[in-house]
Amino acid sequence: MTAVPLVFPDRVPYDREVAASLFAISWLLILAPLYIARNEQPMSDDGLFSLPLDWKTFALAALLFLLHVVWDPLLGWISYLLFWLVWLRSIGLIQDILSTPPARWLLPIETSGWSSSNLLGPRWEVISENWTTGPMAIARCEHGHLSIGGVSRDGIRFLGLTLVHRSGFVQDPFFESKTSHSEVQRILSRPPVEQEGLEWPKRLIVPDEEE
């Protein structure tokens, strides 16, 4: 539909402007749900340009599209083909990310004497020395970074561990495909926290349904 004004040049009022508007809306409908879904995940990263999109080809296609408005309509078709290439590559990137389920592993802890530099191993870059809700330390790996952060629920404090993909999406660091990555496996080969956790709160245990 976005190419209709290009197929019938000078027959649709403001054909190039209409095509530009349709292209902008179509890509907004792709990027906005991705951006919102990712940022709804706890401990995710929120950069726009880290979204799983072929940004280099996208930038070239957008530049050619703008040039076709003021210069040569043929550039619009080249841009159109490049946008298709971006879409196909981005679908592959999104499939790769979604093949690993999101997960955050929680450990209830006593936080009164917490010291990140003393209780975390040397592989971890400390962000916050004291316990706090949000990121406290990261360990970089091939496809992003492992993240340790503070979580609070019903007055109980936890440490959360997750893998943040370079796209910003949260993934399960213990999922089979991730533990096969040498760097993740090396970092998780020993407990990241040199402190015993507390017993899991009984009020957060969901009882099994009686058959």
Image (cartoon, rainbow, N blue to C red):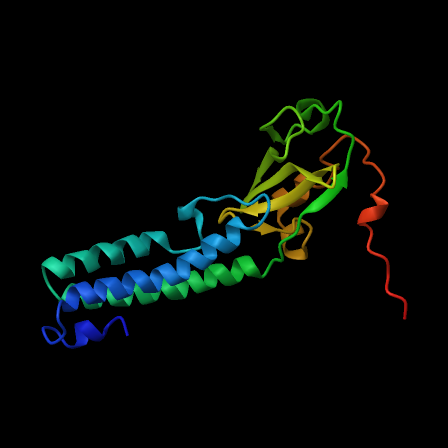
| Residue 33, horizontal then vertical, whole percent | 46, 59
Quadrant placement of the C terminus? bottom right
Q: Compared with residue 39, is residue 195 higher up or lower down, i.e. above or below?
A: above
Q: Residue at x 68, y 41 (%)?
A: 160
The answer to whether one can see residue 181 in this image is: yes
Q: In which quarter of the image is residue 63?
A: bottom left
| Residue 118, horizontal then vertical, whole percent | 71, 22
Q: Is residue 41 left or right of residue 29?
A: right
| Residue 111, horizontal then vertical, whole percent | 74, 28
In this view, the residue in front, 100 or 211, is 211
Q: In this view, does 139 lie to the left or right of 87?
A: right
In this view, the residue in front, 154 or 141, is 154
In this view, the residue in front, 59 or 16, is 16
| Residue 43, horizontal then vertical, whole percent | 58, 43
Q: Is residue 189 left or right of residue 51?
A: right
Q: Which residue is drawn at 22% across and 62% down?
A: 20
Quadrant placement of the N terminus? bottom left
